[in-house]
C-alpha cells in the first residue's frame, strides 16, 4: 500500500531538494510482529519483491500498520532512490473500460536486503 508522505502526496514536489532532504529515503512500514516473524529489525535495509520486480527500502516497524500489510510513504522518482521505485512492483494493466489506470493492492514479500 502506498500512502502520502508528510512532505509529498505522491511524486509531486520531488524536484524540490529541500523536501527530498526531509523525506530522507524510501521507508517500508511493517507491523512489529510481522517483522519479528521474519527476523527483521527496525531501520534495517530490506527488499520488497514479487514476480514483477524488487525494490530496496529501509524498514520501519510500527504497531500502526495491520499484520500482513506493508506501507510505503510517498513516492520517489527512480533518480531519487537507490533502486527502482515502488512502481516496479505494480501492474501496468489498464482497466477494461476506458483504458484508465487501475487501482489495486499489490502482493509482495519482504526479506532482509544487502
Image: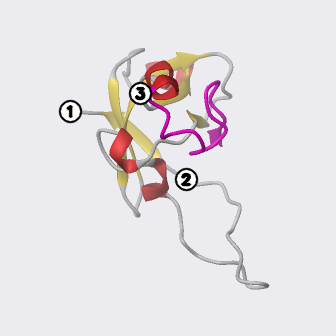
Check disc 3 and report the residue beneath it: 25
In the image, residue 102 above or below residue 69: below
Q: Of callouts 2 and 1, which one flags the residue occurring earlier in the amino acid sequence?
A: 2
Write the residue at 67% across / 38% down. 9
Q: Position of residue 28 (x, y in %)?
A: 49, 31
Residue 90 horizontal side relative to residue 65, left or right: left
Write the residue at 68% across / 28% down. 66
Residue range corresponding to the magenta coloring? 1-17
Q: Where is residue 79 in the image (x, y as percent from the top left)?
A: 34, 46
Please tell me whether residue 11 belongs to the stretch shown in magenta: yes
Q: Position of residue 1 (x, y in %)?
A: 63, 43
Residue sitting farthest toward the left: 114
Q: How far apart are marks 2 and 1 (CA)?
A: 22 Å
Q: Of callouts 3 and 1, which one flags the residue occurring earlier in the amino acid sequence?
A: 3
Give the mark toward the camera: 2 or 3. Answer: 3
Write the residue at 79% across / 85% down. 97
- Please tell me which residue lies in front, 37 or 26: 26
In the image, residue 39 above or below residue 73: above
Local packing at callout 2 (Cα closer than 10 Å; few below 14, some 14-19, many 20+) is: some
Pointers 2 and 1 in contact (CB under 8 A)?
no
Amino acid at each position: 500500500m502506498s500512502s502520502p508522505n508528510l512532505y509529498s502526496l505522491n511524486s509531486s514536489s520531488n524536484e524540490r531538494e529541500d523536501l527530498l532532504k526531509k523525506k530522507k529515503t524510501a521507508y517500508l512500514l511493517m507491523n512489529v510482529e510481522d517483522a519479528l516473524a521474519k527476523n527483521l529489525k527496525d531501520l534495517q535495509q530490506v527488499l520488497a519483491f514479487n514476480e514483477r520486480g524488487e525494490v530496496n527500502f529501509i524498514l520501519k516497524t510500527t504497531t500502526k500498520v495491520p499484520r500482513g500489510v506493508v506501507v510505503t510513504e510517498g513516492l520517489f522518482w527512480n533518480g531519487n532512490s537507490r533502486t527502482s521505485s515502488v512502481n516496479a512492483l505494480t501492474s501496468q494493466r489498464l482497466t477494461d473500460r476506458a483504458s484508465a489506470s487501475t487501482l489495486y493492492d499489490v502482493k509482495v514479500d519482504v526479506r532482509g536486503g544487502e
